[in-house]
């Protein structure tokens, strides 16, 4: 990947003259079955631009309470889209058509206007859970019947593609806008690509300039994305296998309980409340051994597998955790 980056064709991205950026956007639009796409520095920027385009001041966004747009984007929906969020109580970050139906406002002038449904594929705080295609289609039908738009936070969309055996285009057909992260499982140094209709992407470019996302010779990082889409998608299955191995090994430790019994993709959430140590203490002691697993509150932890984690690293990690808990 770094060799490809070093030899990337480059131009002025702001003027659509960077061939590597243009190529990447064409590849992602085709992959997702959309008309056009735009390269952006981060997935959060993809989300916030999409919300700002779909919504106007005072509108309401429907999303699961665990959604990234609610918990990890610094109040962006209120600040940039100037919209409220109606949080749904889904299961592992996944909700159903009845949940959406129940959240849609009646149209009263006293209430905010329901405008957008946001889906996170896979669900981060849901433990990397994959939205089944049929459930996506059912949610999409309800939203469209009420003239609502749909947006997919596709940070780990390709993990869902590999785990479910469903194409990215079929998943994306259920929504109006969708983005693909390049810097997570695909292993790129930076970047994400937002996709949708030509009109949507035209407006996305305006927002890209507005909030400082326009770049110049961005081909050096876009080339990494093209490489990753060709060479790093199928290998995501290794991450899923490693996550399952980690879950199996640590669940056998005294006091450790899996939060999600089924590990579908590359995340393992586990509870350490029955151990003598807090999640933060365990995280700090693991870090002393060169192992990074984040604490989510006092009792929960999240481990994420990726292309820099090998099977032997999983064994080392689980052995290190066992050693910490008995000493």
Image (tube, grey):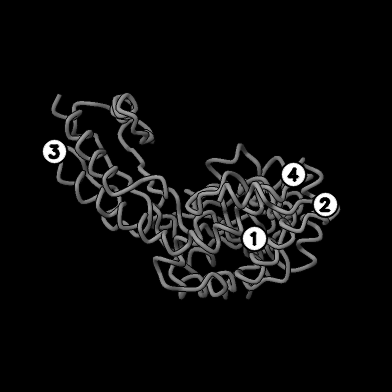
On screen, 321 above or below 162? above
Left or right, 286 with reference to 148: left
Looking at this view, is 176 or 168 the one in front? 168
- Badge 3 crowding class, 10 Å Cα cut-off, few under 14, some 14 to 19, many 20 or more, is few
- Badge 1 crowding class, 10 Å Cα cut-off, few under 14, some 14 to 19, many 20 or more, is many
In the picture of the structure, the residue carrying the numbered disc 1 is 116
* Circle 3 SS class: loop
Give the x, y percent position of residue 191. Answer: 63, 48
Image point (43%, 57%), residue name: 90
Mark 2 → mark 3, Cα distance in angstroms: 54 Å
Mark toward the start of the polypeptide (4 vs 1): 1
Mark 1 → mark 2, Cα distance in angstroms: 20 Å
Mark toward the start of the polypeptide (4 vs 2): 2
Q: Are marks 1 and 3 in contact (CB under 8 Å)?
A: no
In the picture of the structure, the residue carrying the numbered disc 3 is 254
* Circle 2 SS class: helix
Q: Are marks 4 and 2 in contact (CB under 8 Å)?
A: no
Mark 4 → mark 2, Cα distance in angstroms: 10 Å
On screen, 160 above or below 84? below
Left or right, 184 with reference to 295: right
In the picture of the structure, the residue carrying the numbered disc 4 is 213
Which quadrant of the figure contains the C terminus?
A: top left
């Amino acid at each position: 990947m770094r060799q490809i980056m070093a030899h990337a064709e480059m131009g002025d991205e702001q003027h659509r003259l960077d061939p590597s950026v243009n190529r990447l956007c064409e590849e992602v639009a085709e992959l997702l079955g959309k008309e056009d796409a735009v390269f952006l520095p981060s997935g959060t920027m993809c989300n916030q631009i999409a919300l700002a385009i779909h919504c106007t001041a005072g509108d309401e966004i429907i999303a699961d309470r665990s959604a990234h747009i609610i918990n990890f984007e610094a109040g962006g929906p209120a600040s940039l889209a100037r919209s409220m969020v109606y949080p749904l109580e889904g299961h592992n970050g996944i909700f159903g058509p009845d949940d959406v139906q129940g959240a849609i406002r009646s149209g009263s002038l006293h209430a905010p206007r329901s405008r957008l449904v946001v889906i996170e594929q896979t669900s981060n705080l849901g433990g990397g859970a994959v939205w089944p295609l049929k459930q996506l289609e059912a949610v999409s039908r309800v939203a469209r019947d009420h003239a609502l738009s749909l947006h997919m936070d596709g940070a780990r969309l390709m993990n869902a593609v590999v785990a479910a055996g469903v194409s990215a285009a079929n998943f994306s057909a259920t929504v109006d806008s969708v983005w693909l992260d390049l810097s997570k499982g695909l292993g790129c140094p930076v970047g994400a690509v937002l996709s949708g209709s030509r009109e949507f992407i035209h407006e996305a470019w305006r927002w890209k300039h507005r909030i400082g996302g326009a770049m110049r010779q961005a081909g050096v990082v876009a080339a990494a994305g093209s490489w990753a889409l060709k060479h790093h998608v199928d290998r995501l299955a290794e991450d899923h296998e490693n996550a399952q191995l980690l879950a199996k090994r640590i669940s056998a430790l005294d006091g450790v309980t899996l939060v999600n019994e089924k590990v579908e993709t590359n995340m393992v959430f586990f509870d350490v409340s029955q151990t003598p140590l807090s999640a933060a203490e365990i995280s700090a002691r693991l870090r002393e051994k060169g192992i990074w697993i984040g604490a989510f509150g006092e009792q929960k932890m999240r481990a994420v597998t990726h292309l820099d984690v090998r099977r032997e690293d999983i064994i080392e990690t689980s052995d290190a955790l066992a050693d910490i808990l008995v000493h």
